[in-house]
Amino acid sequence: MENKRVLVVDDDRQSRSILESRLGSLGFEVVLANNGEEAIEILQYDPYFDLIITDVMMPYMTGFDFTKRLKEDAKTKDIPVIGTSAFTDWEKARHKGDLLVDGFVPKPIDKEVLLKEIQKVLGR
């Protein structure tokens, strides 16, 4: 995972901190965004990420809205996305097409589950 860049999008400071620590220990360069709107701004100027990890339930712009905007933009549509949430019905939302993610890690985030999902999504 060395030299891979990941954008973490989560409105919860503790969740961002946990993800930053766990991803950093795996060798990722981590960039943090407090919400979907901030993430969109970051991506407009710097769309070169290997992975995006986003919370599903956020104020202002939900993970559903964020992933939709992400996949509509030619510069960001191919970046793999992993959703995170304590939301229990994410699989149903994903199959309906409301949540455009390549993988999912439930909260609280377990480091081993996170690593396996990252490896699956990045094809390793």
Image (tube, rainbow, N blue to C red):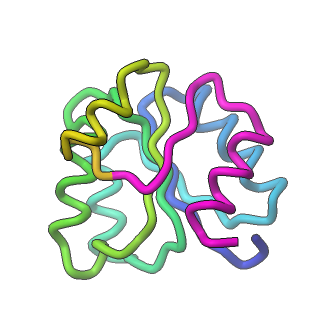
Measured from the top left, where is residue 103 in percent x and y? 49, 50
Of residue 81 and residue 22, the one placed in the foreground of this image is 81
Residue placed most toward the observer, 69 or 96: 96
Residue 7, x across and y down, in percent: 50, 58
Give the percent coordinates (x, y) of residue 33.
44, 48
* Above or below 90: residue 24: below
| Picture quadrant of residue 28 | bottom right
Q: Is residue 105 above or below residue 100?
A: above
Vertical comparison of 71 with 117: above or below: below
Tell me where the magenta segment starts and ends, as one range. 101-124
In which quadrant will I find the N terminus?
bottom right
Number of dots carrying numbers = 0
At 35% across and 55% down in the image, what residue appears? 39
| Residue 2 shown left or right of residue 56 in the figure | right
Task: Report the side of 53 relative to 96 (left or right).
Answer: right
- Image coordinates of residue 3 in percent, x first then y, are 72, 78
Quarter the C terminus occupies? bottom right
In the displayed structure, 120 sits above or below 107; it is below
Please give left or right for residue 68 compared with residue 123 in the image: left
**Residue at position x 23%, y 65% from top?**
71
Residue ID at (34%, 68%): 43
